[in-house]
Structures are given as structure tokens and as C-alpha cells.
Image (cartoon, grey):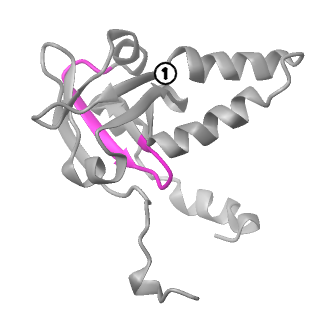
Amino acid sequence: MVVPERQRVTNMFMGEYNHTVDAKGRLIVPSKFREQLGDEFVVTKGFDSCLFVYGNPEWAEMEKKLTALPVTNASARKLTRFFLAGATTCEVDKQGRILIPSVLRDYAGIEKEAVLVGTGSHLEIWSKERWLAINSYDDIEDIAESMEGFGI
């Protein structure tokens, strides 16, 4: 049976939210994202010096892909270490916050202000300064043009 487009439920993460990290390293996760992620999910190092956030089903898929990489390939070992060594399970407290370990906050340069960004299959957590610096979008037309081969 084909489900009409308007009735399909999607787990696509969308939106941009600014929040403050408290002195203990806790960050509020917007309720929209908590509804999709559940009470427990994985946060790990991401590309571009941000953090990636995966729901448990998506993380299980990522783990399968990473552990399937050949251990004889140095780049595969390095990528696997990058994602798995930095990964941590986060639980949402009663105030809707998660504790981001200091090693991850340091990696992403998150001190006080953070931006949570939906990127489709996962979330990204950025320091506000890095988010503003990397997202000028001055070259978005050129980028869009270069994506023609991907069907965009």
C-alpha cells in the first residue's frame, strides 16, 4: 500500500536552534529534536569541528558501516577511531538537557553558546562562533551548480 505524501512520517532533522551551555556542560535539546531522538542517543565528533548527534537506530547503522571497514586500511582505521573513540551515549534529563563531555566540547570549541542544526539524517552541534564563521553562504550558487550531477 502506498502512503499518501501528507501522511508519511519522517525522521528528517530540520531547523536551527541557539542555546546556552551551562557551567556543567549541559545543553538543552529542543523538544522537536527530543521527540525524534528519544531519551537516549549518541553524540560524537563530526566533520568541520562540530559534533554529530545520531538516534540509536541511525548510530547502529553507522557502527555497522564503520566496523565493516577493512582494518588493513590505515584511512579506515583512522576514520573508525575518529567516530567511535569520541562517541558517547547521552541521556536527556527532566529539564530536556544533555551533558556534553568536556572532550567533545573542547573538540567543537563549544564554551557558552551552541547552535543545534538539523541536517536530515542527524543533528550537528556547533559553537556559535564557528557556525557563524562557516556559514556565510556567499558561494551557495556555485555550490548548487556543482551539485547538478547529484540530482539537486
What segment carries the magenta color?
A: 110-123
Taking the spot 69% from the left edge, 35% from the top edge, the residue there is 64
Quadrant of the frame with the C terminus: bottom right
Q: Is residue 146 above or below residue 127?
A: below
On the question of residue 80 being in view, the answer is: yes
Q: Position of residue 58 (x, y in %)?
A: 53, 44
Residue 116, magenta (yes or no): yes
The single residue placed furthest to the front in the displayed view is: 1
Taking the spot 40% from the left edge, 46% from the top edge, the residue there is 136
Q: Position of residue 113 (x, y in %)?
A: 20, 29
Q: Is residue 83 above or below residue 36?
A: above
Q: Position of residue 146 (x, y in %)?
A: 69, 60
What is the total number of numbered labels drawn onto the structure image?
1
Query: What residue would you read off at disc 1?
Result: 87
The single residue placed furthest to the right in the displayed view is: 72
Q: Position of residue 134 (x, y in %)?
A: 43, 38
- Identify the image quadrant of residue 84: top right
Q: Is residue 99 left or right of residue 151?
A: left
